[in-house]
């Protein structure tokens, strides 16, 4: 049996439903996909794609989207105004975890950040995600900060 071909590309509006499904499968407590948010997600993908640096990346296995992450590039007021990258919403189909799909997607996001001149890549991960934390450490990340959120509504 041949090796599965993995391809990383920028997401397009037509990927919105699958991205919503992946996010739902990757939630700390898996939920049903919120397809009511489909128009907003599709519009967000179009808007993000129109930016100069930030992107939503998807990884395909034999043309099926099996993972997603958002790469956000911003200018820091510290570090001499250097560019910084943040990875958000990284999700891989649970049936494919541990097979290298996430590492390929993460490496692609990191390579893009490096190519764009970022001085670092950072991310946060829910405290309940021990497997994800081991994954990030195994891919060269170090847990250096404590994260906080203030959610409206």
Image (cartoon, rainbow, N blue to C red):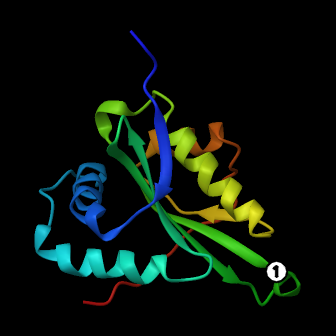
Q: Is residue 98 visible?
A: yes
Which quadrant would the C terminus be assigned to in this image? bottom left
Q: Nearer the viewer, residue 25 or 6?
A: 6
Tell me: residue 93, above or below residue 18. Answer: above
Furthest residue toward right:
80
Q: Secondary structure at mark 1?
A: loop
How far across and how far down the image is residue 82, in percent?
A: 82, 80
**Total tally of numbered discs in the picture:** 1
- Label 1 crowd (10 A; few <14 / some 14-19 / many >=20): some
Residue at the (70%, 54%) spot, across then down: 111
User: Which residue is tagged 1?
Assistant: 82
Q: Quadrant of residue 44?
A: bottom left
Q: Nearer the viewer, residue 137 or 39?
A: 39
How far across and how far down the image is residue 63, in percent?
A: 34, 41
Residue at the (70%, 51%) spot, across then down: 142
State left or right for residue 58 relative to residue 142: left
Q: Is residue 91 visible?
A: no
Q: Quadrant of residue 138?
A: top right
């Amino acid at each position: 049996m041949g090796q599965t071909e993995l391809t990383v590309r920028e997401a397009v509006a037509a990927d919105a439903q699958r991205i919503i499904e992946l996010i739902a499968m990757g939630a700390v407590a898996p939920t049903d996909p919120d397809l009511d948010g489909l128009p907003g997600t599709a519009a967000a993908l179009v808007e993000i794609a129109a930016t100069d640096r930030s992107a939503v990346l998807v990884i395909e296995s034999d043309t099926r989207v099996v993972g997603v992450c958002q790469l956000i590039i911003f200018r820091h007021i510290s570090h001499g105004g250097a560019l910084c990258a943040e990875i958000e919403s990284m999700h891989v189909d649970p049936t494919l975890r541990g097979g290298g799909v996430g590492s390929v997607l993460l490496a692609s996001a990191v390579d893009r950040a490096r190519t764009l001149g970022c001085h670092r890549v950072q991310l946060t991960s829910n405290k309940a995600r021990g497997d994800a934390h081991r994954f990030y450490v195994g891919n060269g990340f170090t847990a250096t900060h404590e994260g906080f959120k203030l959610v409206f509504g």
